[in-house]
Image (spheres, grey):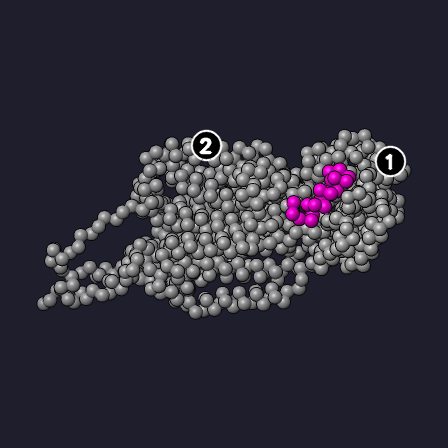
Amino acid sequence: MATFLYRLGRLAYRRRHFVALMWVALLTLAGVGAINAPAAGSTSFSIPGTEAQKAFDLLEERFPGASADGATGRMVFKAPEGEKMTDAANKATVAKTVKELSDGSEVVSVTDPFTTHAVSKDGTVAYLSVKYDAPAVGLKDATRDALETAGDGARAAGLTVDVGGDALQAQPDAGGIGEAVGLAIAAVVLVITLGSMIAAGLPLLTAIIGVGIGVSTITVLAKALDLGDTTSTLAAMIGLAVGIDYALFIVSRYRAELAEGRDREEAVGRATGTAGSAVVFAGLTVVIALAGLSVVNVPMLTKMGLAAAGTVVIAVLIALTMIPALLGYAGRKVRPAGEKGRKPAEEAAGSVNPANPANLVKPANLVKPVKPVKPNLGTRWASFVIRRPAAVLLLGVLGLGAVALPVSQLELGLPDDGSQPTSTTQRRAYDLLSEGFGPGFNGPLMIVVDAKNSDDPKAAADTVSDGIKGLKDVVTVTPATFNKAGDTATITVVPGSKPSSTQTEDLVHAIRDDVASKADADVLVTGTTALNIDFSQKLSDALIPYLALVVGLAFLLLIVVFRSILVPLKAALGFLLSVLAALGAVVAVFQWGWLGGLLGVEETGPIMSMMPIFMVGVVFGLAMDYEVFLVTRMREAYVHGESPSQAVVTGFKHSARVVVAAAVIMMAVFGGFISSGESMIKMIGFGLAVAVFFDAFVVRMAIVPAVLALLGHRAWWLPKWLDRALPNVDVEGEGLRTQAEKDTDPDEDRELVRV
């Protein structure tokens, strides 16, 4: 591996014009394709195998044209103080609004509050419902705008009007100003780490090019593959973070090779062969983790994972080819590590004329004493950990364990209008409906009675209705509505508790377990609330198999990389600590409200259902990045003859600064998404930023060296039979050293003798 990448790096360095032109051409091609790509259209959301999804599919079959999975909107009206919605003037105003909405595009039906009895008991609140023929994520922007502005006339007439429903489902944004701030922080960290604007600009430039190609490709394929905006946001988030980090590791290793006196082409080759090998395997772990999301069998998650994995692959390829090419263009502007204001090493060496003996021998009084090299912070920290490994290990594990404690109170759900900021019209509409009709009105359940094989479909539906009325926490049960064939009925149930409450979840289970078992028909519960419950359950059930698959594959991969059993095991256990601690922090902030005001969390509630499995996938991949970059340098030192303790110090000496910089950059990129107005993106950005902090600074910087110090030589133990069976990928670059020794001129050290 190292030898192949060494040759690839040197080839890209020499053929820099071709390599740069190739990537620019790909970016241009993808950009033009994205500009001319057809609109994505409707993006469906389905959860195969769940009861709620089966009910939706049955409704599509038995109630053709009803758009069972179509978006719904609600416009809520509140009369001025001292008036009622049933007053003639207010009724006329609402009628005009109904007519205006009925003339809109994508609209299937609009209900009249006064004919559907959608007026509160005190007469002050009323609402109309709008049904669309496209799902929420597929509605046109013009349709959403029409729904929001349709109430302007009623507002002018003195009514309070707010709009809710999934039709106004916010489209995820990319972080806006926060993302720009994150990139600015990343740029500052790169300048500090790499010592110059030119060197710092290379990782940023290549990362932006990689994300541009990835996101543009997603846009081109969006319509054909039914990809949503969240897919692009995630791909940009992950691609930007790993793209900067991968390029940073190669540029940093290149500067270290220059500092050892190698010429620039050789330094590029060695940096690509060693740090590039780590990049390849780190990228593979991220790809495994993201692509593994497909085992959950939720199409949306599968597409998000594969798209983000594709962006990571692009980031790896750019780091291995375009970075060497750009280093060729940069030339002497990228200086050796530790050099400030001095000429590059090869220039200094070239300025000495060996033909002049005066340049070779100087009087002792003219030779400046060599100052001892001061150990850097990474060296000092590693030495401290090695002296007190047990204490550091105990403190790190207990600290992360304490932060992870809130996970025991984790509640899963999907965000609804009740979790929106109080400044939004969706939240105000939600509160008005709760005020006028009760909290459960915002999450009605739809019961589908499949009586096709029943002797008396009407009696079967009545039995179901009566059974539901006898359950706790039920406010309203509407009469059954049959299809034209008379073999399928729908019943709407309004719970007494809000949609995300445990009482509503218990009601769904009671209908499915108790009522369904007594009916002479198949009874299915669906609706947004039931779909959220099924989604959460499906993700919870898939978490352990997914974790086993991803960790298992990555464990095998790391065995090949490190040629050790205990090092990959330690890496996996450390990851579990960091992801649990990150989830604990998410629970504390978004569910309990701790520091919520500081982070712009206006409303607490259940944690997004996909958050645990999503964090497991993404954080595992990123955690293995730091593990590979840090421990491969330790492994390299150990293979080259250093003691286990000294190898740990050497690894920190060369890698700690870069790993810290990479972690800060990744935290800045993810942290930029916390400013998003979309709660899902905000939660993901916070969770990933915190997870990177815990994993990089606690697990990899403290727990890892402590464990390696305690294990000693045992850390690198591998059974002989397994050692023979595993392929030698040579991440440490041992093959490069062997090749260099073979290429050394045997006559190089011989002196010329005058005869």
Determine if the magenta segment contains residue 362. no
Along the line of sight, which residue is nearer the eye, 334 or 547?
334
**What crowding class fits label 2: few (fewer than 14 Cα within 10 Å), some (14-19), or many (20 or more)?**
few
Question: Dot 2: what SS?
Answer: helix
Frontmost residue, 92 versus 443: 92
Q: Residue at x 80, y 33 (%)?
A: 468
Residue contact at pointers 1 and 2, CB within 8 angstroms: no
Q: In this view, does 493 lie above or below 228?
A: above
Q: In the image, what residue type sits under mark 1?
A: Asp
Where is residue 525 shown, x and y percent of the image? 76, 39
Q: What stretch is highlighted in magenta?
A: 422-442
Quadrant showing the N terminus: bottom left
Question: Residue 398's mark?
Answer: 2
Q: Would residue 277 be seen by someone viewing this image from the given angle?
A: no
- What separation in Å lies between label 1 and label 2 (alpha carbons)? 57 Å
User: Which numbered disc flags the more N-terminal residue, 1 or 2?
Assistant: 2
Q: Name the residue under label 1.
A: 462
Q: Residue furthest front?
A: 82
